[in-house]
Image (cartoon, rainbow, N blue to C red):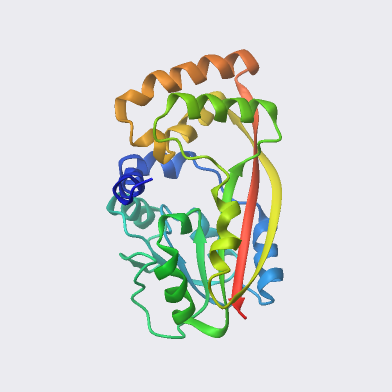
């Protein structure tokens, strides 16, 4: 993928920011237990810089764990949704490649569903710069659980029908990317699901970058998915399964 295509996909979230805030899944409590265990420090009272905060889904949960959070978000549309949802949380308009914070400012730098939009050659050194010596870089992603046949089949259809399709396995490359830096890497996977409607599933799909960037051309893809899902789930409800992958990196 070219850098211009990558940038276009990243910008697509501003077009669907309201839908993103309304439909994207949260994260299971076990995720934050894992972050604390893998980092060997508590989120309670910790200073956290949450980068690529989007509409604030992860930021809110970090705050509920007792962290003192400052959010970083480059997109205007996403930042507007964040401000409406979490008006008391400080928000800085920037990105992970150039963090506007002093050296050693944070106990954690976190990325919820966002680190893959950065340039690792820049974002990892920036995270390490703003972290205290015993701080941790933590990143996580909700991934579709491909062990469920209907999810795997849906991903295959989307790959066939969407020219800009991004496969869900890219976070598996994160430990390899981090290996180029002087960090110790630990990982964890958490399986969970949420009960939603078919329409909820379609709204969630529509907020993925490869569909959002298509504009009106995504409509027939989503209509076809509606037919598939209504056949599979005639009562209109389903369990949407996820694997939440979390990676925590420390200085080696």
Measured as percent of width and height from the top left, residue 153 is found at: 61, 25
Task: Give the camera-side residue of 224 and 23.
Answer: 224
Q: Is residue 54 above or below residue 67?
A: above
Q: Which residue occupies 47% across, 59% down?
A: 115
Q: Position of residue 16 (x, y in %)?
A: 35, 40
Q: Work out whether residue 78 can be spotted.
A: yes
Q: Residue at the spot x=66%, y=73% of the render?
A: 39
Give the residue displayed 42% in from the left and 85% down from the top. Answer: 103
Q: Is residue 181 above or below residue 232?
A: below
Q: Residue 212's x, y, as percent? A: 36, 36
Quarter residue 140 falls in: bottom right
Tell me the residue at 44%/39% (across/down).
208
In this image, 163 relative to 152: left or right? left
Kindly indicate the quadrant of the structure image that contains residue 30: bottom right
Give the quadrant of the N terminus: top left
Q: Quadrant of the C terminus?
A: bottom right
With respect to residue 90, does 133 lie above or below? below
State the residue in front, 85 or 196: 196
- Residue 123: give x, y in percent of width and height: 42, 68
């Amino acid at each position: 993928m070219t850098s211009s295509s990558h940038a276009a996909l990243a910008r697509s979230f501003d077009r669907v920011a309201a839908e993103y805030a309304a439909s994207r899944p949260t994260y299971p409590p076990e995720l934050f237990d894992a972050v604390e265990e893998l980092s060997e420090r508590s989120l309670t009272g910790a200073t956290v810089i949450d980068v690529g905060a989007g509409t604030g889904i992860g930021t809110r949960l970090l705050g509920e764990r007792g962290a003192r959070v400052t959010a970083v978000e480059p997109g205007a549309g996403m930042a507007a949704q964040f401000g409406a949802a979490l008006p008391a949380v400080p928000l800085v308009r920037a990105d992970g490649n150039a963090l506007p914070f002093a050296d050693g400012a944070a106990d954690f730098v976190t990325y919820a569903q966002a680190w893959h939009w950065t340039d690792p050659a820049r974002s990892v050194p920036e995270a390490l710069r703003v972290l205290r010596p015993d701080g941790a870089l933590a990143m996580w992603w909700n991934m579709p659980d491909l062990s469920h046949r209907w999810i795997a089949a849906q991903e295959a259809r989307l790959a066939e029908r969407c020219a800009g399709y991004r496969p869900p396995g890219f976070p598996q490359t994160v430990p390899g990317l981090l290996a180029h830096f002087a960090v110790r890497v630990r990982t964890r996977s958490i399986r969970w699901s949420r009960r939603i409607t078919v329409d909820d599933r379609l709204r969630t799909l529509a907020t993925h970058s490869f569909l959002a960037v298509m504009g009106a051309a995504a409509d027939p893809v989503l209509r076809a998915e509606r037919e598939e899902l209504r056949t599979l789930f005639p009562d209109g409800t389903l369990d949407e399964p996820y694997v939440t992958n979390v990676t925590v990196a420390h200085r080696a």
